[in-house]
């Protein structure tokens, strides 16, 4: 199957009460780990590229790697998405360069400016057969170089979503309900709790419309423990409880973004490998188990969190 948009994926996910995983990709091993898991589990999958990933690996390399993954996994739909596009020019470059979906994240701008920029991207994208994700509300955490402290996030205001979606024509909407980017999502000792009331209010006003959750890594504590055991230092790393993500997937959330858990899976594996094999220096030796760790983590998400196995 060629690389597809998210349109049909989201329609099926909404109707079926599950979500599609959107995993951030930066290199070959990450792309292979994710798509091997999705391929074996017959799950639709979104591979997303941030501005930072594009700067790290180069647009063309990432597109070609994703095309190779689609060729190797012909039975599953794969979407190629720009994560947190921050300008019309960046979105245009990805639309012109083979992406099937882009996010324009103008959530830090005023409501009016967010609408204006999103609408401009939507017009260009739709003319080129590409779908657009937009964002209303501000998450805490780290996005590219922007840091928003926990407590300074702004939950999405449900009374704004209808006007925003109607005026922009966007295809999906990321909302802020208490998730945040990175591996330190909550202060230790506090109880993580997503604002399902905000989610339900938003989806009531947008019947049938796909909602997106960013900052949805669970920060598995076995990865954190392994990192700390083998020379790392990540005290107080906490994520979103998986049962809350599962619940969101049963509601209107059709896309769940995961990046930090990939980083943790790889880092834990590589730290352990080096501690146990101090004399090894061939990158294939430590990247092979790291890729397997990504695959196992993604398989777990697909089956136990997203519920999209067998939905390809
Ligand atoms: O939301 C941010 C994603 O985790 C991408 O992170 O900008 O460091 O590639 P990055
Ligand atoms: P995490 O940092 O929780 O993995 O979030 C990733 C994300 O939202 C990418 O856009
Ligand atoms: Zn994000």
Image (cartoon, grey):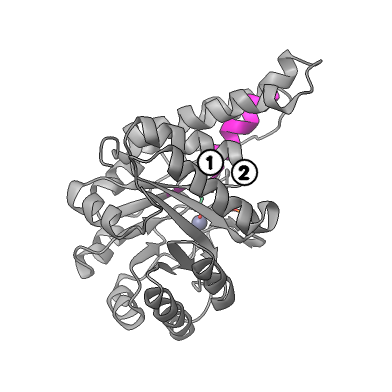
Instruction: Say what secondary structure mark 1 lies in.
Output: helix
Q: On screen, 216 above or below 129?
A: above
Residue that appears at 37% across and 57% down:
212
Q: Looking at the image, in which quadrant does ligand 1 appear? A: bottom right
Asked if residue 185 shows in the view, the reply is: no
Q: Give the residue at mark 2.
A: 27
Q: Which mark is residue 230?
A: none
Q: Position of residue 213 (x, y in %)?
A: 40, 54
Give 240 or 312, whichever is nearer the viewer: 312
**For disc 1, does the CB lie below 8 Å from ligand 1?**
no
| Quarter of the image where the C terminus is located | top left
Where are the magenta residues, as a range?
257-271
Tag 2 near tag 1, CB within 8 Å: yes
The quarter of the displayed image where residue 120 is located:
bottom left
The quarter of the displayed image where residue 122 is located:
bottom left
Q: Position of residue 256 (x, y in %)?
A: 39, 49
Q: Position of residue 71 (x, y in %)?
A: 44, 42
Say whether residue 185 is left or right of residue 269: left
Q: On screen, 272 above or below 201?
A: above
Q: Magenta stretch: dominant SS?
A: helix
Q: Give the residue at mark 1.
A: 31
Q: Residue furthest right?
A: 279
Residue that appears at 65% across and 28% down:
287
Magenta-span inclusion, residue 267: yes
């Amino acid at each position: 199957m060629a690389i597809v948009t998210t349109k049909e994926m989201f329609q099926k996910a909404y109707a079926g009460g599950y979500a599609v995983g959107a995993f951030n990709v930066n290199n070959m091993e990450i792309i292979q780990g994710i798509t091997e898991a999705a391929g074996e589990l017959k799950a639709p999958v979104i591979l997303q590229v941030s501005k930072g990933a594009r700067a790290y690996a180069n647009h063309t390399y990432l597109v070609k790697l994703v095309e190779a993954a689609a060729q190797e996994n012909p039975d599953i739909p794969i979407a190629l998405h720009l994560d947190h596009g921050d300008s019309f020019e960046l979105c245009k470059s990805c639309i012109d360069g083979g992406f099937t979906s882009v996010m324009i994240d103008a959530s830090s701008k005023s409501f009016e400016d967010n609408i204006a920029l999103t609408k401009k991207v939507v017009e260009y994208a739709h003319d080129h057969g590409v779908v657009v994700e937009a964002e209303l509300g501000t998450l805490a955490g780290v996005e590219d170089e922007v840091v928003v402290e926990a407590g300074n996030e702004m939950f999405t205001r449900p009374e704004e979503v209808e006007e925003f979606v109607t005026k922009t024509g966007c295809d999906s909407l990321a909302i802020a309900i208490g998730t945040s980017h990175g591996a330190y999502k909550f202060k230790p000792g506090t109880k993580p709790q997503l604002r399902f009331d905000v989610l339900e209010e938003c989806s009531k006003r947008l019947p049938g419309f796909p909602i997106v959750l960013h900052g949805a890594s669970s920060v598995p504590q076995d990865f954190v423990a392994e990192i700390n055991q083998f020379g790392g230092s990540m005290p107080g790393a906490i994520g979103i409880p998986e049962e809350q993500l599962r619940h969101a997937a049963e509601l209107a959330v059709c896309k769940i973004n995961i990046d930090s858990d990939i980083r943790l899976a790889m880092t834990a594996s590589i730290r352990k490998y080096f501690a146990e094999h101090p004399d090894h220096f061939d990158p294939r030796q430590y990247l092979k188990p790291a890729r397997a760790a990504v695959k196992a983590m993604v398989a777990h998400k697909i089956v136990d969190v997203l519920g999209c196995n067998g939905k390809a």
